[in-house]
Every structure is written in C-alpha cells, then in structure tokens.
Amino acid sequence: MVEEAIPHRGQFIDTLKEGDRVTEHFRVLRKSVKISRTGEPYLDIDLGDRTGSLTARLFQPRQSAGDTVQAFADLFQVGDVIRVSGRVDLFQGRPQMILDKLRLSREDEVAPALFERASERPLDEMEKELRASFEAIEDPMLRAAVVRVFADSAFYRRFLDAPAATRLHHAYRHGLLEHTLSLFRAAESLRACYPDLDWDLVRAGVLFHDIGKTEELGERAGEEYTIDGTLEGHVYLGARRVERAIDSIEGFPEETKRLLLHLVLSHHGEREFGAPIEPATREAVFLHQLDNLDAKLANARETLAADRNGGSAFTDRWASGAVGRRYYKGAPKPAAEKDVPGE
C-alpha cells in the first residue's frame, strides 16, 4: 500500500521561533555525523527553504539498539528534500531544531520553488544588461576575452543561475549575475571621479572577478562547496578560466593579460580573506573596494530583511554570518495618534 502524500504545510524557516513544533519538508544543505561530549553520535545538518536556513540536530535515542543516528544519516544526501519532525530551541543565542524523526520526501509532496530563493530582478532583464556590458568594452582584445569566456554555453548558463555565495551575500539563484551587474553599474557611475583608471580593464575585471564561483559552489544556493571549490577556491578557478580564454586569442598583449589576471587574483584584497596576492594596481584597489562594498551592503540588507529578533533594536550577531555584525534597525516608528473624541 502506497503511503498518502503529505504536502508542504507552510512552515517556512523565517516564521519559526523558539518553542515551535515543526513537521515540515526542507532541503538538506549540509550533513555530518558528530560525536557529543558524552561520546554519543548525533546527526548535524543544515536545512533550508526559500526563506533561509537553520541548523538541526538529531540525537541518539537512549533506548535504541544499534546505530540509529547513522541509519537516519544514510537515508538522504545533501541536496535531497526530507520531511522532519521536531522542535525549535536556542543554542548559544541561535535558533536550531532538535529532531525526533525524519524521512526522505517524495517528489509528489513538494515543489522545487519551495526551497530555492531567487533574485527579485527578472532574469531576462539582467541578461540583457549583461550583454550590454560586453559592448561597453572598447578595447578589442579585452572585449574578445570577455566574449570568449561567456561563449561557453555550459558556463554561461551556470553563470546566469549561480548564487554569489553560500550565505554571506546574494546567496540565491541568479545572485552571482545580480552581484556582478551591481558592481558594473557602480563602477560606471564612478568614472568621472577616477578618470585616470583604465576603465576597459576595470569593466573586464568586474565581469571576471567572481566567475570561479560557477565551479566553486554547489548547484543550489546554500549547498556546500564542490570538491574543486574546496581544494582550489573560486579565485584560482576564475583566473584559470580567464587565462585559458586569453591564451586562445592570437596576439593578446602580454601586459594586458598580466594586469587582467591580477584583477581576478587580488579582488579579495587581503591574504587572510582568500586573496593569493594583494592589489598592486589602481584598478585592482578599485575593484577590491567596490566588491567589498557591494557584498557588505548586500549582507546588511539581507540580514535586516530576514530579522526575527523583534525584541531588540539590533539584529542578532549570528544572523550576518561570517560578517559577525549586529545591524541597527532604526528607531521605532511612533504609533499613530488616536482621534480624540469631540475634536
């Protein structure tokens, strides 16, 4: 007898609060089996839907015989959708879910749109803007390099769909494209302020700076890094793709190649933040600062939008991820004055 399908109940992560009982479908973003301080195994996973992500844990039932935790872990892989039952509590000030049980979800129970956020900007609008950015590059060799990279159909489709990060900023479908275009528009708006920069070099650097994320990140927003992403990182992966394209263009100037690769390799700014080399040209300094600005402002915007800490004027520190910052939500708006009878 086939078990009746149980559809999504509408318990989205951004609505959950301490004490809630949860029975819902979520996508698995990360999983591992760990050992507690008492020596007991437990399942540690990150669950996600289109509104956010949440850590969940399933502990070994004391009365169970056998490795129950491992048995549960073997039911699913990262990227699968599972139906869980549990409760929400706080651990070190952060909400988490303590699970009682879980099972693999069926395809007829859930729709993919429930579990993946996407840019609010229409894709066709952004794709048109991306194409226009290619044409803005006047230097024929730099334009040829950009066209050569984006002519790879598999890469191009992945670039359109990819998130820009796992959690820090633009961590949703089409996020990499949105982030890149935001940088391009910002750079163009500052041309008059810095007329001595090589603006074609800047434009190409903006378009190329994060293309390695198409190989570094998983297929869906929030997933763990790929093997290549973990071992090599998006900075190297992106520079490698650019170098291959350049080397396929006859007569590409060696100095231009050197400067362009430096932009990609140095855009994280400092070695402690993943840059193999620090910015050593004016264009590289500009690109790094602009990239950092856009990422940090996006982090602030997204953290404030997702805030659930109604009892504080600030967001929770953990909510901004690796940024580790509490954002001020602003003074509370005064309540509307009530009409006074007789006036």
Image: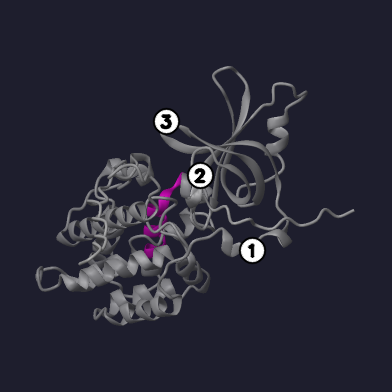
Query: Tag 3, which secondary structure?
Result: loop
Image quadrant holding the C terminus, namely bottom left
**Residue lying at 25% horizontally and 56% vertically, measured from the top left:** 333
The label shown at residue 54 is 2
Inter-mark Cα distance, 3 to 1: 33 Å
Q: Which residues are magenta?
A: 231-243
**Residue 43 screen position, x and y as percent:** 61, 34
In the image, taking residue 122 as reference, residue 272 lies left or right, namely left
Residue behind mark 3 = 92
Tell which circle, 3 or 1, labels the residue nearer the N-terminal end. Answer: 3
Inter-mark Cα distance, 2 to 3: 14 Å
The label shown at residue 111 is 1
Name the image quarter holding residue 129: bottom left
Q: Main secondary structure of the magenta part?
A: helix
Other residues around mark 1 within 10 Å, as few (<14) / some (14–19) / many (≥20): few
Amino acid carrying label 3: it is Gln
**Residue lying at 54% horizontally and 50% vertically, measured from the top left:** 48
In the image, taking residue 127 as reference, residue 218 lies left or right, namely right
Query: Tag 1, which secondary structure?
Result: loop
- Judge whether 60 appears above or below 300 on screen: above
Other residues around mark 2 within 10 Å, as few (<14) / some (14–19) / many (≥20): many
Tell which circle, 2 or 3, labels the residue nearer the N-terminal end. Answer: 2
Nearest the viewer among 288 and 150 is 288
Amino acid carrying label 1: it is Ala
Amino acid carrying label 2: it is Leu
